[in-house]
Image (cartoon, grey):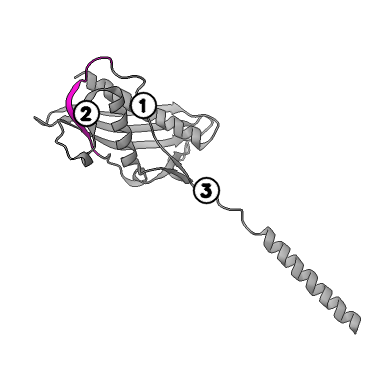
Amino acid sequence: MKQIIKSKITALLFTGLAAVLLSACAVPPPAPEDAFYRLSPRAAEPLAAAPVLKGTVEVDRFAAAGSLANRPLLFLEPGSGAVSEYHYHFWIEAPPILLQNALVSYLRSTGIAERVVTPEMRVRPDYTVRGRLMRLETVLGENAIGVAEIELSLRRESDGELLVLGEYRAEIPSGPNGVKTDVSAIEKAVNKAFEDFVADIQKQ
């Protein structure tokens, strides 16, 4: 009788130990930490000539709709036609603000205008720049690319004349190092779009 009880206790202990080990194995690994990214495009060098735009240029917040207004980075798988959001990878600010600040810094670095501000400065501008974000994503595949497509306009406030209006698109090859390399490619694409916009301003 004692032997039977001892065998049952041993079996229960073994079953309990097995259950503990199985539950330990079933614990999922910790989720990856969130990562945040900036865009910091800069002109290659300041313009040699005097500022083309005399006075103050105000850059408004960019317009964007749907996922383009959200902070998660976007990617497109070739052939699917579906744009998806990355998990754990975010822009440090919402793209409409991110691009507004990036364009302010870019225009200042070119010297294209005497002063470049945002509406928060509450000064009366001589010119207004407005932007509409159309694409800001990575196209995945064997050779991934960063894509930026932006509509930009320049308006003279004294008479309301639209001096520049265009859609600026750039595609820059990415590399093999994942999201960080993709972000670098997107930044270069934004840089190229801004560069083309400034080139159109210089034609005025």
Picture layout, residue 20 above or below residue 73: below
Number of residues whose C-alpha sits closer than 10 Å to that of mark 3, classed few (under 14), some (14–19) or many (20 or more)? few
Picture layout, residue 49 above or below residue 154: above
Number of residues whose C-alpha sits closer than 10 Å to that of mark 1, classed few (under 14), some (14–19) or many (20 or more)? many
Which is more toward the observer, 122 or 22?
Answer: 122
Q: Indicate which disc, 2 or 3, sits on the residue closer to the N terminus.
A: 3
Percent across and percent down for residue 44 are: 36, 20
Picture layout, residue 83 above or below residue 8: above
Please give the name of the residue rendered at 35% of the width and 44% of the height, measured from the top-left corner.
94
Percent across and percent down for residue 1 are: 90, 85
* Distance of label 1 from label 3 (alpha carbons): 29 Å
**Residue 16 in which image quadrant:** bottom right
Of the 4 image quadrants, the one containing the C terminus is top left
Q: Which residue is label 3 attached to?
A: 33
Percent across and percent down for residue 116 are: 23, 31
Q: Which residue is label 1 attached to?
A: 42
* Distance of label 2 from label 3 (alpha carbons): 40 Å
Q: Indicate which disc, 1 or 3, sits on the residue closer to the N terminus.
A: 3
The circle on residue 75 is none
Element type at marker 1?
A: loop
* Distance of label 2 from label 1 (alpha carbons): 16 Å
Residue 82 shows in this picture: no
Q: Residue furthest top?
A: 48
Residues drawn in magenta: 48-60
